Image (spheres, rainbow, N blue to C red):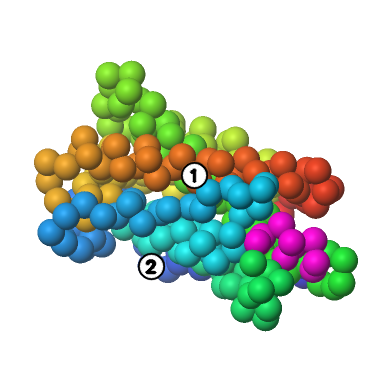
Amino acid sequence: MSKSKTRIVEWLFCDLSNLRFEYWNMSSLNSAVKVPTNVESVNRMQFPEIIDGKINTGEFLQAARDVVETIHKLGKLFAPVRYDMQGNIDKLTTKYSMDKESNSNLQDMILREKSTEKDLVALDALMWLRRALHMILLFFEKIVEDHKAGKATEDLVAFLKEAYHETLEPYHGWMAQQLFSFLSRMAPTRSQVLLALADGETGKEEITLQNVEISIINLKKNIITLKAFYDDNNLEIATVV
């Protein structure tokens, strides 16, 4: 079995035993969050500024870890995505740690791997991590845009499906698509998402949405830059797994 297929099988089944196909409820939400004294959940997702077209590797990986921690607050529904993201972050961290000076930015690290190695672990890991981050970005963007339009759509299933359709779906085979379709029906409501992002503090919807909007600005810049980098260097792999 190829590495890509092995990864998608792991993605499919990593946490199904824990999911137990339960629908989202407030009791599971409350058990998934901690209650600190202020709203910090999305403030930590600070992706680096793009400098001379390059992305700082260490800062990017830390921000990606923060995204994983943030979506963990949204419950077990996001466990497969979280699992896949964390695995790719770990692979990139291993590569980065081999030579932090030479691998100080993502672009140089990937091009060096491509020119010197046959097993392109980091190239593949960053590609899939970018796709997953793009889905999270679009999901949050749709919530923010809905709010700016004066709405407060509680059912987020459509937002989640649209985000998936534009990012991961083109690269997923039938099995992965069916699993996502099933799990998306358990999507948390808007109120539950905002409560989770506020670490369980009530009355923080407005500031939470503001923090989300601020946090995804650089995330979007990073994703656009990485997509262009992969396209310009013919690194993108369109294989369906």
Q: Residue at x 31, y 43 (%)?
A: 211
* Rendering coords of residue 85 (x, y %): 54, 61
Q: Is residue 112 above or below residue 188?
A: below
Residues at discs 2 and 1 in contact (Cβ within 8 Å):
no
Q: Is residue 112 magenta?
A: yes
The magenta-colored residue range is: 105-113
- Spatial CA distance of label 2 from label 1 is 33 Å
* Rendering coords of residue 22 (x, y %): 33, 55
| Residue ID for mark 1 | 218
Q: Is residue 163 above or below residue 230?
A: above
Asked whether residue 176 is in view, the answer is no
Which type of secondary structure does the marked residue at label 1 adopt? Answer: helix
Q: Give the position of the N terminus as an image quadrant.
A: bottom right
Q: What's the amino acid at mark 1?
A: Asn
Q: Residue at x 61, y 55 (%)?
A: 55
* Rendering coords of residue 222 (x, y %): 58, 47
Q: Is residue 65 magenta?
A: no
Q: Give the position of the C terminus as an image quadrant.
A: bottom right
Q: What's the amino acid at mark 2?
A: Asn
Q: Residue at x 80, y 52 (%)?
A: 235
